[in-house]
Amino acid sequence: MWAALRHQTLSSSFSSALQQWRLGFSVLNRALYSSLADSSNSGTDRKQGLLQLDEVEKILSDVKADNVKVIPVQKHCEFTDYMVIATGRSAWHVRNIAQALIYKAAVGVLASWVKQKQQGARRMLLPSVEGQEGGNWIVIDSGTLIIHALDEKVRAYYNLENLWNTETSNNEGSQDLENAFVKVRRKNNSKKPAKKSA
Amino acid sequence: MRTNLKVVDNSGAKRVMCIQALKGKKGARLGDTIIASVKEAQPGGKVKKGAVVYGVVVRAAMQRGRCDGSEVKFDDNAVVLVNKQGEPIGTRVFGPVPHELRKKKHVKILSLAEHVA
């Protein structure tokens, strides 16, 4: 459903884009008008449609996601800057968290879409979602920010924090390994000449 | 079909033989999903020998063009075992994996990988 929305061209009408979502029409409208008021006041530096870290944190606390962790991975991950991990209490909760984040991104996109239509710009990006069918592990990818919504058991199984927190130490470990293979000649401080090995 | 691929996660399988490429008439390439049969497995793993599993190709000796014109190819053919919903069976992925997986919606494998090429 989200993929269909992404591939939809901007030339399609506003109303059909709204109908494509299963979200409540009235809720969407209310949020849209409030966000239109907000976005006109806020600065336009933010990338349209992509989620920002502070928005994500606010939504996750609204949805009551447990154990939210933000890990900056700029140093050892080339494809992203921040990883956010959140736990849901059940599969339905996990799916809810994902939907809330997408909803927020989509509302932001809609608000800017109206503005861009007036300015004539044509760039619109929605964050992509994976794992929607089975509600175990849902990943929302918005460029520099990747959000993982997991079940409690799945989180213990994959143990993502361990992986990224110890990533730097793994890389440093390999550096030492390279140094270890370099042969270092012994310093000969004695007055006797160096012994030739037998 | 019949390509032997190395398994690079800790799901328990070691070698796997492709029996079907899920998309594409000419075969599966880097980033595609395949159906494979486990030919060799570790004794205490999650998958056993002879099991039919899904996998995502993460390294291929055939070069794959990138959008900036460069091509990427690896020395071996490797696969990460995945269940039908696309969730990896193992918990860690070894060796480098390419960026192409992000476009193909395999961010889960990317996030478990130890090095992204």
Image: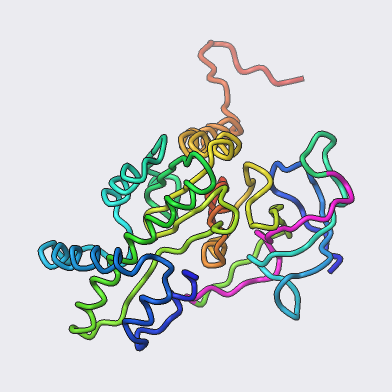
- The single residue placed furthest to the bottom in the displayed view is A11
**Residue beneath the point at 39% across and 77% down:** A19
Looking at the image, is B40 positioned above or below residue A171? below
**Residue beneath the point at 13% across and 61% down:** A42
| x, y percent for residue A173 | 53, 32
Residue A93 shown in magenta: no
Quick check: A58 left or right of A156? left
- Judging depth in this view, the residue of A18 and A169 nearest the camera is A18
Residue interval drawn in magenta: B48-68
Report which quarter residue A40 is drawn in.
bottom left
Report which quarter residue A6 is drawn in.
bottom left
Instruction: Please state the total of marks drawn on the protein image.
Output: 0
Looking at the image, is A194 positioned above or below residue A101? above
| x, y percent for residue A161 | 48, 36
Quick check: A147 left or right of B33? left
**Residue beneath the point at 71% across and 56% down:** B79
